[in-house]
Image: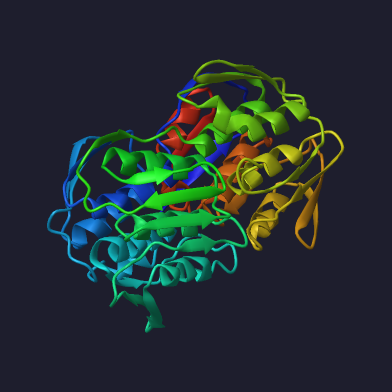
Amino acid sequence: MEKIIINGGLPLNGDVYIDGMKNAALPIIAATLLCGDTCIIDNVPAVSDIAMLLDIIAGMGAKVEYLDKCRISINTANVKPGCSPFDLVCKIRGSAYIIGAEIGRFGTAHVGYPGGCDFGVRPLDLHLMGFEALGARITVESGYINAVSPMGLHGNSIYFRIPSVGATVNCILASVFAEGVTTIEGAAQEPHIVDMANFLNACGADITGAGTSSIKVRGVKSLKGCHHTIIPDMIEAGTYMAAAAITGGCVRVHNVIPKHMESVCSVLQRMGVKLDIGADTITVHGDGKLIATDVVTQPYPGFPTDMHPQISALMCVADGVSRMSELVWDNRFRYINEFQKMGTIISVADRTASFTGSQKLSGAPVVSTDLRAGAAMIILALRAHGTSQISKISLIERGYDNIVGKLASLGADIKKVDE
């Protein structure tokens, strides 16, 4: 076990480079299962969730080869359904995409129930409803999701009562080879759905409307391999922007798509942070002085739930009372007990947390409760006086490659040690 040690109070200055988006790489890796050919994927983030999904598809018969740290060759010609390793599938949420890919290519699936961060109830009901609309029969037994399509898969109309990234991805994967046209209404609009659709179209799929609430998938007979580059990670970018804002100094964030960052930029600007937005960079000019604001998490293009804890860290020191309302997940506030160890003033009622800004934060030993909460604890520790120790950092490394090295290069007093 390892932990992160931070001596807070230092401003961040310099340049930081953003990796590929984990949440785009996961569905694209699953989508390679449909191809039965070789795909070259660039800008793959070197994080543990990605490594685990690659191990899962390798266990199914895929040939996975690292061409360099962030460039991977995947050949899925010899993949077999129903053999994804259960002990790995149950550890990450992204393994859910194996279900849609197996149904789409083989018309059958046998996949363990996926895991991931605990944000409360995260049902697969919309996923399964979409599979059934396409002609699959679904059963859940002994921890496995089973699907068969005795009459084959056929295009149909699918309606989501709430936007779901996972269900949208899975229904696209399942319908690529379905006979006829599948229409997904109420679809999620996140950039990583667009990235997966672009990947599949480059392989020969016929998908239109990705990035809108109405997606059409016209079934095709086959796919071929392609060469694809993963889009930059907007959540990683937002995390470093928040760290720069809370500590002061000047940080230029490279390899971003500013359009994806609009809701995060809007919140930071409301909090008094000066931003210079370029073609593929955002420069954060911070003096450590922040203004209270209210934020509500929503599906894209609204403010992302995956930036909720990081912005909450800023609210802990902003002048006045800020409020964070979480409308996506019902158990995202578990980090608050850890924040309070540093002297923060927070109260929670229903799905809204109120933060009274305080400058008297002190370093403390804290435990990461999930991926983004762990990143937020790092942000808060960078501002707090004294030394903080953050444990259970394996959760953080699920989504951030070399976060310690990147922050150290910006001037943070931070290191990773054996616990």
Q: How is the structure coloured here?
A: rainbow
Q: Residue at x 63, y 32 (%)?
A: 242
- How many numbered circles does the render carry? 0
Q: Is residue 255 left or right of residue 55?
A: right
Asked if residue 240 shows in the view, the reply is: no
Q: What residue sits 52% from the left and 41% below the top?
A: 211
**What is the residue that sits farthest to the left in this orientation?**
78
| Residue placed furthest toward the front | 180
Residue 138: percent from left, percent from top: 39, 78
Q: Quadrant where the N terminus lies?
A: bottom left
Q: Quadrant of residue 252?
A: top right
Residue 220's x, y, as percent? 28, 52
Pick whichever, 210 or 47, lies toward us: 210
Residue 304 sits above or below residue 283 on the image: below
Q: Is residue 71 above or below residue 337?
A: above
Return the residue found at the far right: 320
Residue closer to the observer: 118 or 58: 58
Residue 27 pos. (x, y %)? 38, 50
Task: Return the x and y of residue 304 as percentages of the image width and height.
Answer: 62, 44
Q: Quadrant of residue 243?
A: top right
Q: Residue at x 24, y 57 (%)?
A: 57
> What residue is drawn where x is 25% and y is 54%?
34
Q: Is residue 261 visible?
A: yes
Q: Is residue 306 above or below residue 109?
A: above
